[in-house]
Image (cartoon, grey):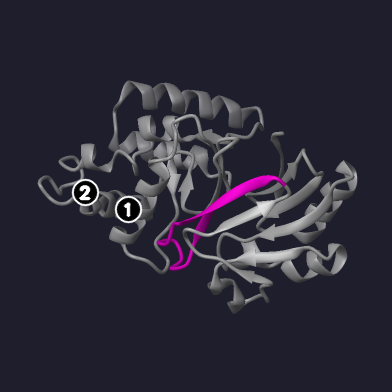
Amino acid sequence: MPLTVHQFPCLEDNYGFLARDEATGLAACIDTPEAGAILKALDTLGWKLDLILNTHWHPDHAGGNAEIKAATGATIVGPAEVTRISALDREVKGGDVVMLGETRFEVIETGGHTLGHIAYFDAADAIAFVGDTLFALGCGRLFEGTAEQMWTSLQRLAALPDETTVYCAHEYTASNARFALSVDDDPALKARADHIFALRERGEPTVPTSIGLEKATNPFLRAPRLAERVGVAGEPDYKAFGAVRAAKDVFKG
């Protein structure tokens, strides 16, 4: 039976995600940006929370762990780095498997934004929860990792099936689109950007996205094709990615 995902806004620009295994009725929250909003959504839906699945240690992703665990008894699962701000019941790393009822999540190592960042991939339903590694038309800042590490992580995600639905943790897409248009003149990107701006004008979300759509239009996944434009022609692919990421870090549009 399928996995049902409920998405809702948290904080200023985060998204909260609740995922329910329909075979057993058990649910997980992916990260805990805002405990109150998550508990309210659980109550409204009438879902039983079994797991908290953290992608990384940042407070807007693991800061609600203790309050939600106290209210629900859920098991906290995540990378070792989460212990910087929260206790873990189970530590996981790339290659591990987490079961939510009958739903099987593969843990993918996606360090770069933070060193121990991970993603959760449900192959049966083609759903990935990627935290702050990959965004719609963007990627996370390199707060702890290197460009080479982040490029490797993005390639792991890009290797997932094109139809994979990608739940990223922030509504950054309009800003990402403005930057993308500054470094890439691909017609498909222009069409996507116009659609994104229209969605945001109506107050509608741009998340989730898909692996196929990101591979076709996201400048961070397309970085090798942009190498000459960002001044690193002939360099390794991760150097092109690093140049695009550095340009985004100072972009003011």
Q: Quadrant of the N terminus?
A: top right
Count residues near mark 2 (Cα–Cα under 10 Å), then give few for <14, some for 14-19, many for 20+. Answer: many
* Disc marking residue 100: none
Residue 103: in sight, yes or no?
yes
**Where does residue 225 sit, x and y in percent of width and height?**
22, 37
Q: Which residue is mark 2?
A: 237
Point 44% across, 34% down: residue? 161
Q: Secondary structure at mark 2?
A: helix
Which amino acid, by three-letter code, is at mark 1? Trp
Left or right of 27? Residue 194 is left
Task: Name above or below for residue 136 compared with residue 29.
Answer: above
Identify which residue, 118 or 23, lies in the foreground.
23
* Magenta residues, start to end: 102-119
Which amino acid, by three-letter code, is at mark 2? Asp
Q: Secondary structure at mark 1?
A: helix
Identify which residue, 248 or 109, lies in the foreground.
109
Residue 33: in sight, yes or no?
no
Which quadrant of the view contains residue 229? Answer: top left
Q: Specify whether residue 180 is painted magenta.
A: no
* Disc marking residue 151: 1
Point 73% across, 58% down: residue? 51
Point 33% across, 21% down: residue? 187
Among the two numbered marks 1 and 2 on one chain, the one whose residue lies closer to the N terminus: 1
Q: Are marks 1 and 2 in contact (CB under 8 Å)?
A: yes
Which quadrant of the view contains residue 189? Answer: top left
Q: Quadrant of the C terminus?
A: top left
Q: Specify whether residue 116 is painted magenta.
A: yes
**Where does residue 77 sit, x and y in percent of width and height?**
65, 64
Give the distance between the C-alpha atoms of the residues marked 1 and 2, in whole angstroms. 8 Å
Point 85% across, 46% down: residue? 47
**Where does residue 78 sit, x and y in percent of width and height?**
60, 65
